[in-house]
Amino acid sequence: MSSRLQIGQSAPPIKLYDTDLKQRELKEFKGQTVVVAFFPGAFTAVCTKELCNFRDSLANFESMNAQILAISVNDPFTNKAFAEQNRLSFPILSDYNRVVISAYDVAGEGLGKLNDYTYAKRAVFIISPEGFIRWKWVSDNPTIEPPYGEIQHTVDDIGRVQPSS
């Protein structure tokens, strides 16, 4: 069992399949701020609302040199249908083996009547361009949305302290 991740620690590696079965890694976004959004399940009301909120804010994040990565335990095929239906253009990654949700300590047990089901808790980690955790938010209640304003503010703050190219 991994210890709880703390602000300032190196972010655990991420190496997962996207909706096109391409393996994506956190390190490919080095030099950018990365917003990692874990979500419990594709096609659920709150997850759809959350990821559409990120979609609608994408231009703002991109203007701050930030990348959104969304991660669920859904298979890549379900994530692809979900991304297509909701016009999500950022990577939706499949942690079907539940390795990354364990590394980030966001594995939830039991969802609804599925007592033995392990899912990704709704959680957001903001990772600095150097690969360190700068902000985190984890909810034990899958119906609660993340604090979008705090996420935008933190990403903006990180962008302001980065040296210009």
Image: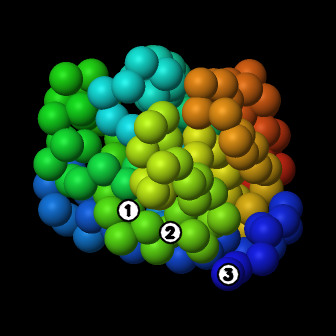
Which residue is pictured at 25% across the width and 43% down the height?
A: 79
In screen coordinates, is 133 left or right of 102? Answer: right
- The disc at residue 95 is 1
Q: Residues within 10 Å of mark 3 (few under 14, many from 20)?
A: few
In terms of secondary structure, where does tag 1 sit?
loop
Comparing labels 3 and 1, the label whose residue is closer to the camera: 3
**In the rendering, at what x and y percent does residue 13 appear?**
53, 76
> Can the viewer see residue 165 in this picture?
no
How did the renderer colour the structure?
A: rainbow
Q: Which mark identifies residue 1?
A: 3
Say which quadrant the C terminus sits in: bottom right
The residue shown at (14%, 48%) is: 77
Marks 3/1: CA–CA distance: 17 Å
Compare marks 2 and 1 and give the one earlier in the sequence.
Answer: 1
Distance from label 3 to label 2 (Cα)? Answer: 12 Å
Callout 2: helix, strand or loop? helix
Image quarter in which the N terminus is found: bottom right
Measure the alpha-carbon separation of dots 2 and 1: 6 Å
